[in-house]
Image (cartoon, rainbow, N blue to C red):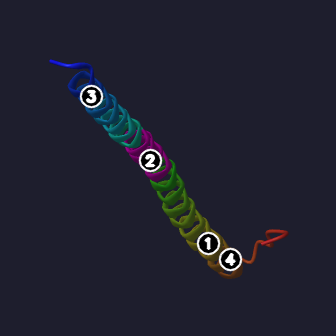
C-alpha cells in the first residue's frame, strides 16, 4: 500500500467515523426529545385527570347545595348564604 492509497483510506475512514458520530448524535437528540414529550404527556394527563375530578366535585357540591336549599324551603329553616 503506497502513501496515496493509505491517505485515501484514512480520509474515507475519517469521513465514515464523522458520519456515524453525527447520526449517533441525532439519535441521542431524538431519544431525548421523545423522553421529554413523554414526560410532558404525563404531566398533561395528570392535569386533565385533576380537572375532571374537580368538575365532578363541583357538580356534586352544586347538587348538595340545591338539596340544602330545597330542605330549607320545605322546613322553613333559613340557612344563610346558600
Magenta-colored span = 29-42
x%, y% of residue 46?
49, 50
* Label 2 sits on residue: 42
x%, y% of residue 39?
46, 43
SS for tag 1? Answer: helix
Q: Which label is found at residue 62?
A: 1
Q: Which label is found at residue 13?
A: 3
**Relative side of 22 to 75, left or right:** left
The residues tagged by marks 3 and 1 sit, at their Cα atoms, a distance apart of 73 Å
Magenta region, main secondary structure: helix
Packing grade of label 1 (10 A; few <14, some 14-19, many >=20) is: few
Number of the front mark, 3 or 1: 3
Determine contact: label 2, label 3, CB under 8 Å: no
* Label 4 sits on residue: 69
Q: Is residue 11 above or below residue 36?
A: above
The residues tagged by marks 2 and 3 sit, at their Cα atoms, a distance apart of 43 Å
Amino acid at each position: 500500500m503506497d502513501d496515496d492509497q493509505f491517505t485515501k483510506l484514512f480520509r474515507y475512514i475519517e469521513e465514515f467515523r464523522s458520519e456515524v458520530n453525527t447520526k449517533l448524535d441525532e439519535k441521542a437528540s431524538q431519544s431525548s426529545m421523545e423522553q421529554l414529550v413523554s414526560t410532558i404527556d404525563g404531566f398533561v394527563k395528570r392535569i386533565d385527570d385533576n380537572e375532571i375530578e374537580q368538575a365532578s366535585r363541583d357538580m356534586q357540591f352544586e347538587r348538595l347545595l340545591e338539596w340544602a336549599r330545597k330542605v330549607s324551603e320545605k322546613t322553613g329553616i333559613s340557612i344563610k348564604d346558600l
